[in-house]
Amino acid sequence: MSSPATRPTPARRQFLLRGLGLLAGLPLLSTCGYPPAPDASAPVTLGRKGGTHLQIWWSGGSKNPAVDQAVAAYATAHPTWSADVSYTNGWDKLLVAVAAGTPPDVVIDAATTLIKGAARQTFAQLDAYLARDRVDPAQYYQAARIAMRYQQATYGMPEHLVLASLYQNDLVLNELGLDPTHAPTSWEDLALLNEQSLKMVTKGRTRAGFVPTWGWPADSAGWLQANGVPLLNAEGTKVAFATPAGVEALDWVARQLQVVGGVDWISAYRKPYVAGPGEALAVDQLAMGLMDVGEIPSTILAITPNFTLHQWPVPGGPSAVGQTFGYFDATLLLLPAAARQQEAAWDYIKFHSGPAGQAFVQPGSAGAAIACIPAVANNLGADEALKWRGRTNELVALAHTPAFLQSPASAAVQAAMQQAAEPLWSGAQDAPTTMAVMQRAAQAVLDTSTL
């Protein structure tokens, strides 16, 4: 679990891989996995002006082919409709526009933005629209249904999903004497990767089995959840993770970091892999890693096109035996409460989040983004290069663990938790002490955060 600011984005991975000369001829991916057009500094007008004209804000920072294509398709079906689509917008810019009385009609942004906006009533509740127009949320993946709601109300409609899973190098597992067809069913299976990797060392060690703090969402919050630990109370106002199972999870991560070689060894080991764990996996120097789906097309297969890959959910820890965890993030279509053309905006949102609009998500992202409707996501055609997507879609259907906190202060709380964990990861502090520090730091953020 990590905030958008710290999560390794597809754009960052592609930039680094291009610097290594590994992606010549491949499209650069934007922050949500979409290949951007060259210039995103100015809005693009789509459709024919003369009737309804909307302002649609996409916050990704680069042009998004899937969004542009969906808008263009809607415009084709509505000849007197048009929209300006702009790409360099964020939360602060939205607040300025709302304060000035000039909000956009549609905002396309992350689940954490939905939470912040819902908490301060920046976005409109959509339940009445859903009921009136008989839009059934059951058509979406469970992850999308979770992301579109905050405090028992619907504030957004799904645009696309991102999934994090365990990705495995089958060749390395064979070399370690392990069965690559055997899904990890416990944290002991993950620890076994490190034990076997150490046994196989004959001279200078360059390979790791599994590094629990490398990838996404490979942080303290993610591992707490994978041990069945709730992060916050139902209202999102109080820390709930300070439990024996929480201490158990932190202690396991710390022990595995020491088994791997300690934080100094891990830092030196990671340094050559500027594109992240997907690069190490692709060159046979990592047995398994927890990372987001964008790593598959943009890093792993870009480096090793014939890579043999297994995808697994994260197994539950000692206090969550028999459970599995799939982490997700989401991008939503949001309706500003002060938008002046709410009916027209809702009609577009309904289209973009419906089957016709969702059909543009995966083709426009080279497979890195996931359409939110299973029937659309599973329409992969005969493209052999996307065969891996079938398994990804099986895992996203099971995903129920948000890679964010259900709080407007999500990013700040996660940062405080990470800072508190650092002494434990380095071996300078024990798990109970770390948990006490982490609890105080996270609660202080919740108590002092402002909307």
Image (spheres, rainbow, N blue to C red):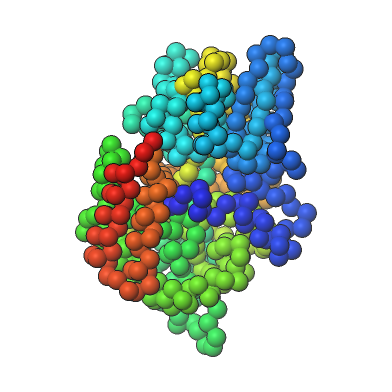
Q: Residue at x 53, y 21 (%)?
A: 101
Residue 104 seen in the current view: yes
Relative to residue 56, is residue 419 depicted above or below?
A: below
Which of the 4 image quadrants contains residue 235? top left
What x and y, as percent, mark residue 119? 38, 31
What x and y, as percent, mark residue 344? 57, 15
Report the side of 166 relative to 226 (left or right): right
What x and y, as percent, mark residue 348? 59, 21
Q: Quadrant of the C terminus?
A: top left
Q: Residue at x 67, y 25 (%)?
A: 84
Residue furthest out toward the bottom: 203
Relative to residue 53, is residue 29 depicted above or below?
A: below
Q: Residue at x 57, y 52 (%)?
A: 9
Residue furthest out toward the right: 25
Report the side of 288 relative to 69 (left or right): left
Please name whichever residue, 359 or 32, is drawn nearer the observer in this view of the structure: 32
Relative to residue 412, is residue 209 depicted above or below?
A: below
Residue furthest out toward the left: 244
Residue 228 seen in the current view: no
Which of the 4 image quadrants contains residue 300? bottom right
Please name whichever residue, 409 or 425, is drawn nearer the observer in this view of the structure: 409
